[in-house]
Image (spheres, rainbow, N blue to C red):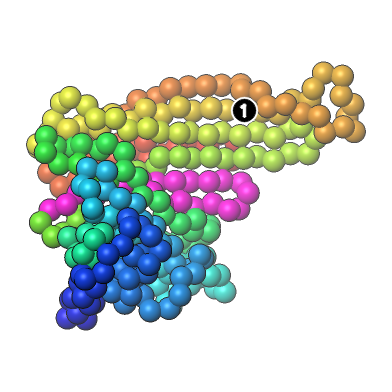
Amino acid sequence: MVRLALILLLMLFSNASFAACEEAFVDEVRRGLGYIEERHEISQFVVCKPMPDAPGISIVAIARLQKGSEVGNSDVMGEYNLDISLVNTSSGDTIAHQFYPRRFVWDGTRFGGIEIDTANYKITSSGRAFGIRSSEGGTGFSYHQSLSLYILRGKSLLEILSNAPIIESFNKRFPQCMNETRTGTRTINMAKKKKNGHFDLLVSEELVDTRDERIKGATLDEDDCQVKVIKREIKKYLLRFDGKRYVIPREMVDFECRIC
């Protein structure tokens, strides 16, 4: 009942007129969902982006640290709820809304926030998904980004891809031109084949290993380094829809660090 009341409150500003994702519009959406306090970059991440295939509709997503879930004294580690709304920019009417409690759990690294991904994820002949990217990092050693896909079903948003690793980066630091890195970057394209009415997802991964080397002629006391690519590899993965969501292959989840 409380959640329903908040959604109805969101729809009360239907007489207002806003530009897509301007600050006043986003703040109205936040207040309508019950986020009364001011935004905080650490404990509350707020993003907005227009829907590319639906003029006048904006995606608003909020990731907020669940009070009481903090790890120790940290204000960046814990359980983050996720709120996603599709909102008519002109009228303020809510097209769809979904609340995911404790959607992101971070107990060992820093939660880096969320981004909205509106690439052309045309997963059915008549339906297009959008993505939410979540990241962790900030330790200086590693960075991870995952992608989840959502599609509109009635007035609900269904998560059809959950936490697919999309970027993995590791950095092994040494003194005097000996750093090593490993970075995997994945891109998604739509296949022509379908399963259970949904196009397969083709994932291409570029894996790059680098190592610092001292510039010729530099002495051991100088920090004149250059980055050398020592290995570059391309991998392919296929994700298929099982009737509820896309299944992530185990070999795509188990990213090989090598330099850890």
How far from the left and from the top, in percent, is residue 143? 53, 46
The question of residue 192 being in magenta is answered with no
**Along the viewing direction, whichever of 159 and 157 lies nearer the viewer:** 157
Residue 10 shows in this picture = no
Tag 1: amino acid:
Thr
Q: Is residue 194 above or below residue 63?
A: above
Q: Is residue 205 above or below residue 246?
A: above
How far from the left and from the top, in percent, is residue 256?
48, 35
Look at mark 1 in the image and give the residue it sits on: 210
Report the side of 192 relative to 51 (left or right).
left
Q: Quadrant of the C terminus?
A: top right
> Which residues make up the magenta segment?
131-153
Q: Is residue 167 above or below residue 212?
A: below
Tell me which residue sits at (81%, 29%) in the image.
224
Percent position of residue 104, x then y: 38, 60
Question: Regarding mark 1 in the picture, which secondary structure is present there?
Answer: strand
